[in-house]
Image: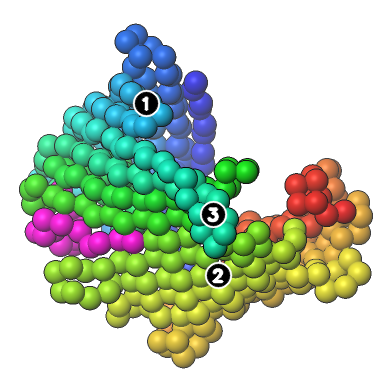
Amino acid sequence: WWSASALVQRYQTLSGDEPYRKLPELRLNANRAGMAGGTTWALESQYTDFEHPEKTRYVNGSRLVLYPQVSLPIERSGYFIIPKLGLHYTKYRLDDPYIAGGRTSITRSVPIFSIDSGLIFERETSLFGNAYQQTLEPRVFYVKAPDRKQDDIPVFDTARYDFSFAQMFSESAYSGSDRVADADQITVALSSRLIDPRNGAERLRVAVGQRHYFSDQRVALPGEPLRIDRRTDFLAALSGRVTATTTLSSAWQYNPRDSQTERFNFGVGWQPEYAKAINLNYRWTRGVLRDIDVSAQWPLGGRWYGVGRVTRSIRENRVTEAIAGIEYDGGCWVFRTVAHRFATTTDRVTQSLFLQLELNGLASIGSNPVGLLKRSVSGYGKINEPGSGRIFGTD
């Protein structure tokens, strides 16, 4: 019911700016259900030393975060209600004041209350001659957190989350702990699923949702405009496995204030067998993005496999990312070589070449491209993955 970790981290972004180094970051998290009165107790704690080489532009220091929480889950077959109360405590020790007249020792305590609730309705239905179990699942999520002055707290590793369904059901609008958002908001969503009663597989999911605010935003990152609207954009999503080998996914973000679409994504994937996948995706964001993406993994013959991805910006009329690789399965070993080209700015690209020899179950030599391939090619299958044949019914 608990876990601990230690991390030392230093990396550079593709744009060239170096983020803060974590030297080190220590975490201790705990989650224990079945406590007194049916409550669940949880703790998120973290201690981090932040260091940046450009000391004239960035302030260095340490941050301690303690977030104890208690919740009372009430879950039944047709509904759930989960009230939760927590206290987000943060303590900073800075080498220099963050702003003129600022402090080198800063503490902040923010109580956070939330209640997550939902209903689950089910019925039997049929579609195209097939029997399904259909659900209708309304969900309501409320969060309350007071405003705390945070302008004299530096930003070590915090950014605003992208707006999505996952973020709408999150307590905070920010990653990291340098800003704890004030909140008095409610998220209302409705989803419906088609479930195959023979095996429990989810064939189709449709979801819509929107967040409503009862107060104006007061906590923000430096340079971030404060929100004054009382409701967010409208989100809708559709996804599912329409056949045994074909998947569809689509997402839509609609701005009701200006009556216009802000974002739209659509994707289709075909995976007839393990290590055989073809994907096509289209992404559009108003004034920012319009691109088409094709990725695939396929046997080339013998023991050779090809894998690749091409992302072309229709708006800029150029290829923004390209991946090309080949893999060879030698039975007890695998060889991979992958070339990666990625546009970092309008006139700059970064290029890399991966070469790896992997001895099954022992070790590997060279740079590992598997993480890149799994992130970039949906359905990518590691050709020497143990047990893959048993799962997908191949040799």
- Up the image or down, 92 lies above or below 227; here it is above
Q: In terms of image quadrants, where is residue 25? A: top left
Q: Is residue 219 magenta?
A: yes
Give the residue at the far bottom of this rendering: 317
Q: Residues within 10 Å of mark 1 (few under 14, many from 20)?
A: few
How far from the left and from the top, in percent, is residue 291? 46, 80
Q: Amino acid at mark 1?
A: Glu
Front-most of 9 and 284? 284
Which residues lie in the magenta part? Answer: 218-236
* In the image, residue 189 lies in the stretch drawn in magenta: no
Among numbered discs 1 and 3, the one appearing first in the sequence: 1
Give the label on residue 75, or none: 1
Spatial distance from mark 1 to mark 2, Cα to Cα? 35 Å
Residue pushed farthest top? 36
Element type where label 3 sits in the image? strand
Nearer-N-terminus badge (1/2): 1
